[in-house]
Image (cartoon, rainbow, N blue to C red):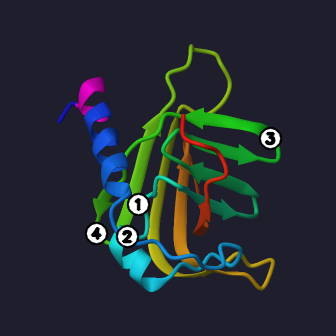
Amino acid sequence: MVLTRSTSLVGMITLLALSGCGKRTTSDSRNGTMAADSMAAHGPGAPQIDSTIVALGNEPFWNVRVTAREILYIDPEHMDGYRFPPVAAVEEGDAHVYRTRRDIPAGEPGPRTLELRIRQGTCSDGMSDRRYSMIAVLTIGAESRTGCAYYRPDTQPPP
């Protein structure tokens, strides 16, 4: 199936409209936990209009932030990050999968594709005592990495 820009736009508008439905409760975003009723209402990978999904890993260190505005990939060598267009998650089994692509000129550095799989489950980053409520698998370009994920309140106002 080929998706057009208008189809993608309709999907994003639908996602944004539906993301305001349901009740979200405040919880400790530092340890990555989220109240069970909110997780059940939104699923493990459904971004909310006022929150960010943060996925992270180490060895090598990496960070991905999924918002309604963009998907941002950062690692120590690329602190400004690589910005990808936002996409709605596709449900595949027990995972929510974000697949996006940057249209950049040939020869420009950086990854062109990003896939982030998020599923509910207990996760530890292996370097601290922090526990997370979601497991993440990132494929950036041709490299795959594993890590954890959590919701964080969005600190930027919508555009």
Q: Nearer the viewer, residue 140 or 19?
A: 19
Q: Earlier in the sequence, mark 1 or mark 4?
A: 1
Q: Earlier in the sequence, mark 4 or mark 2?
A: 2
The quadrant of the rendering that contains the C terminus is top right
Q: Look at the image and give the residue range highlighted in magenta.
A: 3-8
The disc labelled 3 sits on which kind of residue? Answer: Met
Q: Residue at x 68, y 24 (%)?
A: 109
> In the rendering, at what x and y percent does residue 114 appear?
51, 43
Closer to the eye: label 4 or 2? 2
Is the residue marked by circle 3 packed among few (<14), some (14-19), or many (20+) residues within 10 Å? few
Whole-Å distance between the Cαs marked 2 and 1? 6 Å
18 on left or right of 71: left
Residue wearing tag 1: 46
> In the rendering, at what x and y percent does residue 141 appear?
55, 40
Residue wearing tag 2: 43
Q: Quadrant of residue 151?
A: bottom right
Residue wearing tag 4: 93
Closer to the eye: label 1 or 3? 1
> In the rendering, at what x and y percent does residue 30 appear?
71, 74
The circle on residue 89 is none
Q: Quadrant of residue 63?
A: bottom right
Q: Secondary structure at mark 1?
A: loop
Whole-Å distance between the Cαs marked 4 and 2? 12 Å
Dominant SS type (magenta)? helix
Q: Residue at x 34, y 73 (%)?
A: 41
